[in-house]
Image (cartoon, grey):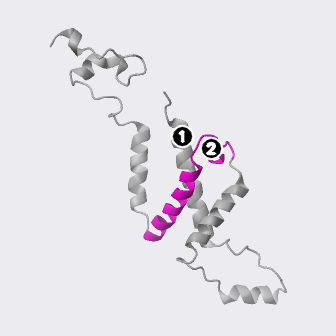
Amino acid sequence: MRDEDRKCNCVRQCPCYPNCDQMMEGQMPPTWARQTPEREDEQDWQRMKEMFPDMAKIILTEVEKVCDSMEYEGSMMFDTIPDRSRVLKMTEDIYDKVKDRYPVEETADQDDMFVMNHETRRRRPPKDNWLGDFIQVLLYQEMFQRRCRHRNCRRW
């Protein structure tokens, strides 16, 4: 093969740019095929999600749907400090979708305690329980993962 036929005529934007000849001869894998730390982290995270309990997997799919709808340039998910009230609203929306599948029972002791203390309202809002807390943790964690990916992605 002649040298003119082998050259890829790369420009700086081409992924193989500095090592075009080695890549054309098959000595070097293309840069997009090499394992980057970000790609390794993403694969590791996917393996960890596969080990989640079934309940967490189901709730996480709902969390991912919400985050998918929020993943656009200028989204509040990518703000330096996301708006807490909007995150709580997203948590409540997810809670409403899964609450029938995982009912949260309140114990009678709590109700008796409120009556004995003559309290007319509960100390915690109705959606503020272990399920709501769990959803909120999954949501924050998924947002963090996407923020890291957004921050580290390379734009050409």
Q: Which residue is at 43% across, 21% downward?
A: 13
The secondary structure making up most of the magenta span is helix
Q: Given the image, on which type of amino acid does mark 1 rest?
A: His
Q: Give the position of the N terminus as an image quadrant.
A: top left
User: In the drawing, what numbered circle is on residue 78?
Assistant: 2
Residue 57 painted magenta:
yes
Task: Give SS at disc 1.
Answer: helix
Q: Residue 28: x, y in percent?
A: 26, 25
Q: Which residue is at 59% across, 65% downward?
A: 94
Q: Residue 37: x, y in percent?
A: 42, 38
Residue 61 painted magenta:
yes
Q: Given the image, on which type of amino acid does mark 2 rest?
A: Phe
Q: Residue 123: x, y in percent?
A: 77, 75
Span shown in magenta: 54-81
Q: Which residue is mark 1?
A: 150
Image position of 113 with respect to 140: above or below: below
Whether pointer 2 and pointer 1 mark residues with C-beta atoms closer than 8 Å, the reply is yes
